[in-house]
Amino acid sequence: MNKLLIVGTVAFDAIETPFGKTDKILGGAATYIGLSASFFNVQSAIVSVVGDDFPQEYLNLLTSRNIDISGLEVVKGGKTFFWSGRYHNDLNSRDTLDTQLNVLADFQPKVPQDYKNSDIVMLGNLHPLVQSSVLDQMETQPKLTVLDTMNFWMDCALPELLDVIKRVDVITINDEEARQLSGEYSLVKAAAKIHTMGPKYVVIKKGEHGALIFHNKEVFFAPALPLEEVFDPTGAGDTFAGGFAGYLTQSENISFENMKNAIIQGSNLASFCVEKFGTERMVDLDKTEVVSRLQQFKSLTQFEIEL
Ligand code: AMP
Protein backbone atom coordinates (compact mmCIF):
# COMPACT_ATOMS: atom_id res chain seq x y z
CA MET A 1 0.00 0.00 0.00
CA ASN A 2 1.32 3.46 -0.81
CA LYS A 3 2.17 5.83 1.99
CA LEU A 4 0.78 9.28 2.62
CA LEU A 5 2.38 11.50 5.23
CA ILE A 6 0.11 14.23 6.59
CA VAL A 7 1.20 17.30 8.54
CA GLY A 8 -1.15 19.93 9.96
CA THR A 9 -2.94 21.06 13.05
CA VAL A 10 -4.94 18.75 15.26
CA ALA A 11 -7.13 21.17 17.11
CA PHE A 12 -10.05 22.31 19.14
CA ASP A 13 -12.41 24.50 17.13
CA ALA A 14 -15.29 26.70 18.28
CA ILE A 15 -17.52 27.54 15.35
CA GLU A 16 -20.41 29.93 14.81
CA THR A 17 -22.58 29.67 11.73
CA PRO A 18 -26.02 31.16 11.04
CA PHE A 19 -27.39 27.75 12.15
CA GLY A 20 -25.73 27.44 15.50
CA LYS A 21 -22.70 27.53 17.64
CA THR A 22 -20.37 24.89 19.02
CA ASP A 23 -18.12 24.76 22.02
CA LYS A 24 -14.67 23.25 21.61
CA ILE A 25 -15.01 20.38 19.16
CA LEU A 26 -12.52 18.28 17.23
CA GLY A 27 -10.91 20.18 14.38
CA GLY A 28 -7.60 20.91 12.75
CA ALA A 29 -6.25 20.71 9.24
CA ALA A 30 -4.55 17.33 9.70
CA THR A 31 -7.68 15.86 11.26
CA TYR A 32 -9.81 16.74 8.23
CA ILE A 33 -7.09 15.68 5.79
CA GLY A 34 -6.63 12.34 7.56
CA LEU A 35 -10.35 11.57 7.74
CA SER A 36 -10.78 12.44 4.08
CA ALA A 37 -7.76 10.44 2.88
CA SER A 38 -9.01 7.44 4.86
CA PHE A 39 -11.62 6.88 2.13
CA PHE A 40 -8.78 5.65 -0.11
CA ASN A 41 -6.63 2.59 0.07
CA VAL A 42 -3.54 4.19 1.53
CA GLN A 43 -1.32 3.87 4.56
CA SER A 44 -1.33 7.25 6.29
CA ALA A 45 0.25 8.95 9.28
CA ILE A 46 -0.25 12.32 10.92
CA VAL A 47 2.62 14.41 12.24
CA SER A 48 1.30 17.00 14.67
CA VAL A 49 1.04 18.00 18.30
CA VAL A 50 -1.68 18.28 20.95
CA GLY A 51 -1.75 18.97 24.70
CA ASP A 52 -2.80 16.47 27.33
CA ASP A 53 -6.20 18.22 27.36
CA PHE A 54 -6.92 16.40 24.07
CA PRO A 55 -9.47 13.62 24.64
CA GLN A 56 -8.43 10.01 24.13
CA GLU A 57 -11.71 9.49 22.31
CA TYR A 58 -10.48 11.80 19.48
CA LEU A 59 -7.19 9.92 19.24
CA ASN A 60 -9.16 6.68 19.06
CA LEU A 61 -11.22 8.08 16.23
CA LEU A 62 -8.07 8.71 14.17
CA THR A 63 -6.66 5.24 14.83
CA SER A 64 -10.03 3.65 14.04
CA ARG A 65 -9.56 5.14 10.56
CA ASN A 66 -6.19 3.38 10.26
CA ILE A 67 -4.30 6.63 10.64
CA ASP A 68 -0.90 6.11 12.28
CA ILE A 69 -0.56 8.62 15.12
CA SER A 70 2.93 7.69 16.31
CA GLY A 71 4.04 11.11 15.01
CA LEU A 72 1.31 12.93 16.95
CA GLU A 73 3.07 14.26 20.02
CA VAL A 74 1.10 14.73 23.23
CA VAL A 75 2.70 17.46 25.37
CA LYS A 76 2.30 16.91 29.10
CA GLY A 77 0.71 19.92 30.76
CA GLY A 78 0.30 21.56 27.32
CA LYS A 79 -2.81 23.03 25.72
CA THR A 80 -4.01 21.99 22.28
CA PHE A 81 -4.08 24.49 19.40
CA PHE A 82 -7.39 26.37 19.46
CA TRP A 83 -9.16 28.17 16.63
CA SER A 84 -12.48 29.90 16.60
CA GLY A 85 -14.34 31.39 13.67
CA ARG A 86 -17.65 32.95 12.73
CA TYR A 87 -19.25 32.56 9.30
CA HIS A 88 -21.16 35.31 7.54
CA ASN A 89 -24.71 34.66 6.37
CA ASP A 90 -23.66 33.56 2.89
CA LEU A 91 -21.28 30.96 4.46
CA ASN A 92 -18.69 31.89 1.85
CA SER A 93 -16.62 34.04 4.12
CA ARG A 94 -15.70 33.95 7.77
CA ASP A 95 -13.87 35.90 10.41
CA THR A 96 -11.29 34.27 12.61
CA LEU A 97 -12.18 35.24 16.17
CA ASP A 98 -9.24 33.63 17.91
CA THR A 99 -6.14 31.57 17.15
CA GLN A 100 -4.20 30.19 20.12
CA LEU A 101 -1.08 28.35 19.00
CA ASN A 102 -0.46 26.84 22.46
CA VAL A 103 1.65 23.66 22.01
CA LEU A 104 2.15 24.50 18.34
CA ALA A 105 4.28 27.50 19.29
CA ASP A 106 7.43 25.44 19.91
CA PHE A 107 6.61 22.24 18.16
CA GLN A 108 9.53 20.27 16.67
CA PRO A 109 7.95 17.67 14.38
CA LYS A 110 9.32 14.13 14.27
CA VAL A 111 8.49 12.06 11.21
CA PRO A 112 8.07 8.37 12.15
CA GLN A 113 10.90 6.28 10.65
CA ASP A 114 8.40 4.22 8.68
CA TYR A 115 7.13 7.32 6.88
CA LYS A 116 10.45 8.88 5.88
CA ASN A 117 9.99 7.21 2.50
CA SER A 118 6.36 8.25 1.97
CA ASP A 119 5.14 8.40 -1.60
CA ILE A 120 3.22 11.61 -1.11
CA VAL A 121 3.64 14.29 1.55
CA MET A 122 0.64 16.49 2.30
CA LEU A 123 1.81 19.57 4.18
CA GLY A 124 -1.44 20.79 5.68
CA ASN A 125 -1.97 24.13 7.29
CA LEU A 126 0.38 24.97 10.17
CA HIS A 127 3.61 26.88 10.76
CA PRO A 128 5.71 26.91 7.56
CA LEU A 129 8.85 26.07 9.56
CA VAL A 130 7.18 22.85 10.69
CA GLN A 131 6.24 22.11 7.08
CA SER A 132 9.89 22.65 6.02
CA SER A 133 11.26 20.55 8.84
CA VAL A 134 9.10 17.62 7.73
CA LEU A 135 10.50 17.87 4.19
CA ASP A 136 14.04 17.98 5.65
CA GLN A 137 13.44 14.70 7.48
CA MET A 138 12.40 12.72 4.40
CA GLU A 139 15.01 10.08 3.48
CA THR A 140 13.74 9.54 -0.05
CA GLN A 141 12.37 12.17 -2.38
CA PRO A 142 8.55 11.92 -2.27
CA LYS A 143 6.86 11.43 -5.64
CA LEU A 144 4.75 14.48 -4.88
CA THR A 145 4.65 17.18 -2.23
CA VAL A 146 1.46 19.17 -1.71
CA LEU A 147 1.16 22.26 0.48
CA ASP A 148 -1.87 23.98 1.91
CA THR A 149 -1.71 27.20 3.88
CA MET A 150 -3.74 30.12 5.12
CA ASN A 151 -3.70 33.93 5.36
CA PHE A 152 -2.67 33.65 9.03
CA TRP A 153 0.81 32.41 8.00
CA MET A 154 1.08 34.99 5.21
CA ASP A 155 0.51 37.65 7.84
CA CYS A 156 2.88 36.34 10.48
CA ALA A 157 5.52 34.14 8.77
CA LEU A 158 5.71 35.19 5.11
CA PRO A 159 9.47 34.67 4.50
CA GLU A 160 9.31 31.14 6.01
CA LEU A 161 6.18 30.43 4.00
CA LEU A 162 7.83 31.54 0.73
CA ASP A 163 10.79 29.25 1.53
CA VAL A 164 8.61 26.17 1.86
CA ILE A 165 6.42 27.09 -1.12
CA LYS A 166 9.62 27.03 -3.23
CA ARG A 167 10.11 23.37 -2.32
CA VAL A 168 6.72 21.85 -3.18
CA ASP A 169 5.12 20.52 -6.36
CA VAL A 170 1.51 21.49 -5.66
CA ILE A 171 -0.04 24.30 -3.65
CA THR A 172 -3.71 24.30 -2.68
CA ILE A 173 -4.99 27.65 -1.57
CA ASN A 174 -8.30 29.49 -1.51
CA ASP A 175 -9.11 32.37 -3.85
CA GLU A 176 -8.69 35.18 -1.31
CA GLU A 177 -5.38 33.74 -0.13
CA ALA A 178 -4.16 33.33 -3.72
CA ARG A 179 -4.88 37.03 -4.22
CA GLN A 180 -3.10 37.97 -1.02
CA LEU A 181 -0.06 35.81 -1.80
CA SER A 182 0.31 37.02 -5.37
CA GLY A 183 -0.98 40.59 -5.14
CA GLU A 184 -3.08 39.85 -8.27
CA TYR A 185 -6.86 40.05 -8.37
CA SER A 186 -7.35 37.86 -11.44
CA LEU A 187 -7.01 34.23 -10.41
CA VAL A 188 -5.34 33.39 -13.72
CA LYS A 189 -2.66 36.01 -13.07
CA ALA A 190 -2.45 34.94 -9.43
CA ALA A 191 -1.83 31.32 -10.44
CA ALA A 192 0.83 32.39 -12.95
CA LYS A 193 2.62 34.39 -10.27
CA ILE A 194 2.40 31.55 -7.74
CA HIS A 195 3.94 29.22 -10.37
CA THR A 196 6.99 31.48 -10.39
CA MET A 197 7.30 31.00 -6.61
CA GLY A 198 7.92 27.25 -7.12
CA PRO A 199 4.87 24.97 -7.40
CA LYS A 200 4.29 23.44 -10.85
CA TYR A 201 0.64 22.91 -10.01
CA VAL A 202 -1.55 25.57 -8.43
CA VAL A 203 -4.95 24.55 -7.10
CA ILE A 204 -7.28 27.42 -6.22
CA LYS A 205 -10.30 26.55 -4.07
CA LYS A 206 -13.33 28.74 -4.53
CA GLY A 207 -15.68 27.30 -1.90
CA GLU A 208 -19.16 26.76 -3.29
CA HIS A 209 -17.83 27.84 -6.70
CA GLY A 210 -15.55 24.83 -7.13
CA ALA A 211 -11.83 24.55 -7.67
CA LEU A 212 -9.34 25.29 -10.44
CA ILE A 213 -6.05 23.56 -11.16
CA PHE A 214 -3.40 25.38 -13.20
CA HIS A 215 -0.35 23.77 -14.77
CA ASN A 216 1.81 25.66 -17.29
CA LYS A 217 -0.73 27.18 -19.65
CA GLU A 218 -3.40 24.57 -18.91
CA VAL A 219 -6.31 24.91 -16.58
CA PHE A 220 -9.07 22.55 -15.42
CA PHE A 221 -12.16 23.33 -13.36
CA ALA A 222 -14.12 21.12 -10.94
CA PRO A 223 -17.48 22.42 -9.78
CA ALA A 224 -18.72 22.13 -6.23
CA LEU A 225 -21.88 20.09 -6.00
CA PRO A 226 -24.88 22.41 -5.60
CA LEU A 227 -26.15 21.39 -2.16
CA GLU A 228 -29.55 22.11 -0.73
CA GLU A 229 -28.10 22.83 2.69
CA VAL A 230 -24.67 23.87 3.80
CA PHE A 231 -24.35 23.72 7.54
CA ASP A 232 -20.71 24.45 8.37
CA PRO A 233 -17.92 24.96 5.82
CA THR A 234 -15.13 24.46 8.39
CA GLY A 235 -12.59 21.96 7.15
CA ALA A 236 -13.91 21.84 3.60
CA GLY A 237 -10.58 23.06 2.22
CA ASP A 238 -8.64 20.47 4.20
CA THR A 239 -11.08 17.72 3.30
CA PHE A 240 -10.60 18.72 -0.32
CA ALA A 241 -6.81 18.52 0.09
CA GLY A 242 -7.09 15.13 1.85
CA GLY A 243 -9.20 13.74 -0.97
CA PHE A 244 -6.80 15.15 -3.58
CA ALA A 245 -3.70 13.72 -1.89
CA GLY A 246 -5.37 10.46 -0.82
CA TYR A 247 -6.61 9.69 -4.31
CA LEU A 248 -3.23 10.46 -5.91
CA THR A 249 -1.46 8.29 -3.34
CA GLN A 250 -3.79 5.38 -4.00
CA SER A 251 -3.71 5.66 -7.79
CA GLU A 252 0.11 5.99 -8.14
CA ASN A 253 -0.37 8.37 -11.02
CA ILE A 254 0.66 11.98 -10.58
CA SER A 255 0.05 13.17 -14.12
CA PHE A 256 -1.90 16.38 -14.72
CA GLU A 257 -4.67 14.26 -16.28
CA ASN A 258 -5.04 12.30 -13.06
CA MET A 259 -4.87 15.45 -10.94
CA LYS A 260 -8.10 16.45 -12.70
CA ASN A 261 -9.70 13.31 -11.21
CA ALA A 262 -8.08 14.13 -7.89
CA ILE A 263 -9.73 17.54 -7.67
CA ILE A 264 -13.08 15.92 -8.40
CA GLN A 265 -12.44 13.41 -5.60
CA GLY A 266 -11.48 16.27 -3.30
CA SER A 267 -14.57 18.28 -4.20
CA ASN A 268 -16.75 15.23 -3.71
CA LEU A 269 -15.49 14.58 -0.18
CA ALA A 270 -15.66 18.29 0.71
CA SER A 271 -19.32 18.32 -0.31
CA PHE A 272 -20.05 15.94 2.57
CA CYS A 273 -17.91 17.77 5.10
CA VAL A 274 -20.08 20.91 4.97
CA GLU A 275 -23.33 19.06 5.68
CA LYS A 276 -22.84 18.93 9.46
CA PHE A 277 -20.87 20.71 12.15
CA GLY A 278 -17.14 20.05 12.37
CA THR A 279 -16.00 16.52 11.56
CA GLU A 280 -19.43 15.00 12.29
CA ARG A 281 -20.36 14.20 8.70
CA MET A 282 -16.93 12.81 7.79
CA VAL A 283 -17.20 10.48 10.74
CA ASP A 284 -20.57 9.00 9.81
CA LEU A 285 -19.88 8.91 6.07
CA ASP A 286 -19.51 5.58 4.31
CA LYS A 287 -17.83 4.60 1.07
CA THR A 288 -21.01 3.78 -0.82
CA GLU A 289 -22.27 7.34 -0.32
CA VAL A 290 -18.95 8.65 -1.60
CA VAL A 291 -19.17 6.58 -4.77
CA SER A 292 -22.80 7.43 -5.45
CA ARG A 293 -22.14 11.15 -5.12
CA LEU A 294 -19.23 10.84 -7.55
CA GLN A 295 -21.81 9.71 -10.07
CA GLN A 296 -23.73 12.96 -9.42
CA PHE A 297 -20.54 14.91 -10.09
CA LYS A 298 -20.18 13.10 -13.36
CA SER A 299 -23.69 13.89 -14.52
CA LEU A 300 -23.32 17.49 -13.39
CA THR A 301 -20.49 18.17 -15.80
CA GLN A 302 -20.91 15.69 -18.62
CA PHE A 303 -22.33 16.98 -21.88
CA GLU A 304 -22.31 15.87 -25.48
CA ILE A 305 -21.66 18.73 -27.82
CA GLU A 306 -20.59 18.42 -31.40
CA LEU A 307 -17.74 20.65 -32.43
P1 AMP B 1 -10.56 25.17 6.47
O1 AMP B 1 -12.01 25.46 6.80
O2 AMP B 1 -10.38 24.07 5.51
O3 AMP B 1 -9.79 26.41 6.16
O4 AMP B 1 -9.89 24.61 7.81
C1 AMP B 1 -10.35 24.90 9.08
C2 AMP B 1 -9.44 24.18 10.07
O5 AMP B 1 -8.16 24.81 10.05
C3 AMP B 1 -9.96 24.27 11.48
O6 AMP B 1 -10.30 22.98 11.94
C4 AMP B 1 -8.84 24.91 12.28
O7 AMP B 1 -8.53 24.20 13.45
C5 AMP B 1 -7.65 24.92 11.36
N1 AMP B 1 -6.92 26.20 11.43
C6 AMP B 1 -7.44 27.44 11.61
N2 AMP B 1 -6.46 28.37 11.63
C7 AMP B 1 -5.30 27.70 11.44
C8 AMP B 1 -3.93 28.10 11.34
N3 AMP B 1 -3.55 29.37 11.45
N4 AMP B 1 -3.02 27.13 11.14
C9 AMP B 1 -3.39 25.85 11.03
N5 AMP B 1 -4.65 25.40 11.11
C10 AMP B 1 -5.60 26.31 11.30
Image (cartoon, grey):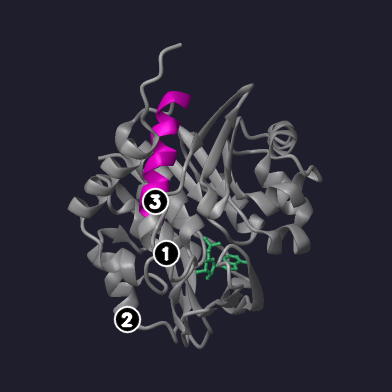
- Tell me where residue 70 appears, x and y as whole percent: 36, 63
The residue under label 3 is 113
Report whether the residue tagged 1 is closer than 8 Å to ligand 1. no
Q: Residue at x 65, y 55 (%)?
A: 128
Distance (Cα) linking label 1 and label 3? 35 Å
The residue under label 1 is 274
Distance (Cα) linking label 2 and label 1? 25 Å
Marks 2,1: beta carbons within 8 A: no
Circle 2 packing at 10 Å, graded few (<14), some (14-19), many (20+), is few
Q: Tell which tag, 2 or 1, sits nearer the viewer.
A: 1
Q: Residue at x 39, y 35 (%)?
A: 301
Dot 2 amino acid type? Gln
Q: Residue at x 53, y 84 (%)?
A: 78
Q: Which mark is residue 56?
A: 2
Circle 3 packing at 10 Å, graded few (<14), some (14-19), many (20+), is few
- Tell me where residue 138 appears, x and y as whole percent: 49, 43
Question: Compared to 170, does 21 lie above or below?
Answer: below
